[in-house]
Image (cartoon, grey):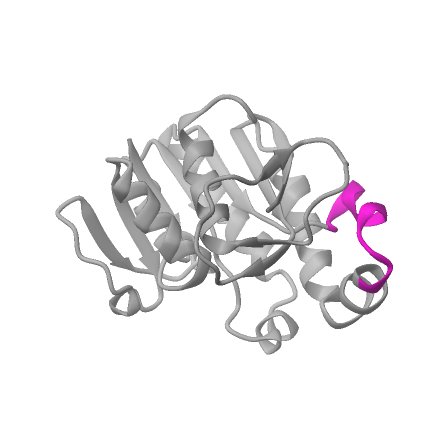
Amino acid sequence: MKILVLGASHGTGALCVKSALAKGHSVTAFSRSPAKLDITHPALTKVAGDFHDAASVRSSVAGHDAVIICVSPSSLGGIKEKPDYFSRGTKYCIDAMKEHGVKRLVVLSAYGVGESRPAASWFQRTFLIGGLLKGVFRDHDVQERMTQASGLDFVIARPMRLTNGKAKGRYVRTAELIGMPATISRADVADFMVEACESTTFLGKRVHLGG
């Protein structure tokens, strides 16, 4: 497959690039500073682009089989400056995918968005979702609803608290609201997101990840 990763220079996005290449896919790594991605591979193309510029996103989407959105602000100030940080770029991506006939979209969201909020812990609901990260969760909710209404073959990933640990390769992935491990490594989330490009198992689902 030809997979476009938006937000590929660091964190989960960079790990998605690594995972996709390891699975034999061709990858386009899209970010403001692609030189920060310390990966070289004959099947990797690095593209400098702006997630919040429609033309930039449109030109990168063409010719791909799937798109992964892992974009995130570098600080909480980013979401204060752009309250539609996630949803604006996602709209540009959806529009471009429809224009170019690209169907598979995999989006990184968070556990506690939408109907999963009541299942989050009291601390998460009070101090994170309703407090420190209120803007993040509010816009992820908009992003998710936009994705669900897109008509594309989407999968939404809702991980528990992210860590920088190594991939375990065994983790909980479910569309049900059940008790979940409190954390999951970014590497395992990346593994799932690439798998979601390949598989039909979770199409049209919001998938909770922990492990």
Residue displayed at 69% across by 49% down: 111
Q: Position of residue 148 (x, y in %)?
A: 64, 34
- Please name whichever residue, 13 or 191, is drawn nearer the observer in this view of the structure: 191
Q: Is residue 203 left or right of residue 176?
A: left
Q: Is residue 68 magenta?
A: no
Residue 96 in view of the camera = no
In the rendered image, which quarter is residue 198 located in?
top left
Q: Is residue 196 visible?
A: yes
Q: Residue furthest left?
A: 42
Which x, y percent locates residue 170? 51, 39
**Residue 27 quadrant:** top left
Most prominent secondary structure in the magenta stretch? helix
Indicate whether residue 122 is drawn in magenta. Answer: yes
Q: In the rendering, at what x and y percent does residue 180 appear?
A: 71, 44
The structure residue drawn at horizontal position 45% and vertical position 24%, both measured from the top left corner, is 199
Direction bottom: furthest residue: 77
Q: Position of residue 118 (x, y in %)?
A: 85, 47
Which residue reaches farthest top? 200
**Magenta residues, start to end:** 112-123
Q: In the image, is residue 13 above or below residue 24? A: below
| 38 w.r.t. 25: above or below | below
Quadrant including the N terminus: top left
Please name the residue shown 68% across and 40% down the image: 145
Q: Nearer the viewer, residue 10 or 84?
A: 10
Q: Along the line of sight, which residue is nearer the eye, 52 or 179? A: 179
- Side of 121 relative to 88 (left or right): right
51 left or right of 77 in image = left
